Image (cartoon, helix red, strand yellow):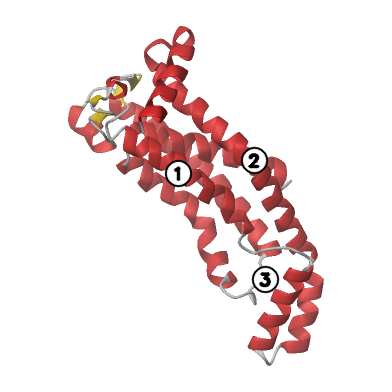
Amino acid sequence: MSAFARLVEQLAELLQPLFQGSAAAAAIVLFTALVRLLVHPLSRAAARGQKARAALQPQIAELRRKHGKSPEKLQRAVLELHTEHKVSPLAGCLPSLLQAPAFFLLYHLFSSAEVGGRPNELLGHDLFTAPLGDRWADALSAGGTAGLVYAGLFALVAAVAFFNYRLSRKTLADSAPLDTPGAGAITKVMPFISFFTLITVAVVPLAAALYIVTSSAWSAVERAVLYR
């Protein structure tokens, strides 16, 4: 974790002339953007997979007519069709899974009083008046303007979540056949996952919340472009 702390510190030093006291927060936003750039090829592949599944809907409808009385045969036929065309119902999960280590690194870094046996100097940085190592409950207890920082984050996350909710409902309805094993549950749950970020932002350190907010906003723009 010491190497990761040095990376964040170096990015903050690089951004210091532009962002002054909020340089560490800006460094986290930049780090998040770099992570998203690395997984962008997988996001593009996931978008192609969604479009490929949508193109298979006429064939899946024919399989429903053919095997409607035998759910097992129908599921097997749909899976064979997906395998033949090299599409996976779960391909869209890969970008999120690969981002998880970066998020947990930030969470652990800004939850630790010491890094490499030394005091964690990053905990002394803030976003405007809100310390990066504090949580929403800390901001409420402290009063002042720190709560306004969280209010802005919540508003942004809610707007992004609503956008992703609408887009997820459309793309899943078009491309996730209910006869694929587990796809029915995925179709019902996936559109609401974006709203869970509101809870996460409220309970994690502000630095980790910044990662979530930046990544969510990136996802909204990326999905708008890739799924247009």
Q: Which residue is drawn at 73% across and 81% down?
A: 77
- In the image: residue 133, left or right of residue 92: left
Q: Residue at x 70, y 57 (%)?
A: 50
Corner quadrant of residue 12: top left
Viewer-side label of 1, 3: 1
> Residue 177: horizontal and vertical position, in percent?
67, 71
- Amino acid on which the number 3 mark rests in the picture: Pro
Position of 115 relative to 197 (above/below):
above
Asked if the residue at tag 1 contacts the one at tag 2, i.e. Cβ–Cβ closer than 8 Å, the answer is no
Position of 196 relative to 216 (above/below):
below
> Residue 49: horizontal and vertical position, in percent?
72, 57
| Cα–Cα gap, marks 1 and 3 | 31 Å
**Residue under label 2:** 40
- Amino acid on which the number 2 mark rests in the picture: His
Is residue 205 visible from the viewing direction of this image? no
- Of the numbered discs 1 and 3, the one sitting upstream in the chain is 1
- In the image: residue 212, left or right of residue 165: left
- Neighbours of disc 2 within 10 Å: few (<14), some (14-19), many (20+): some
**Residue under label 3:** 177
**Residue 101 got which mark?**
1
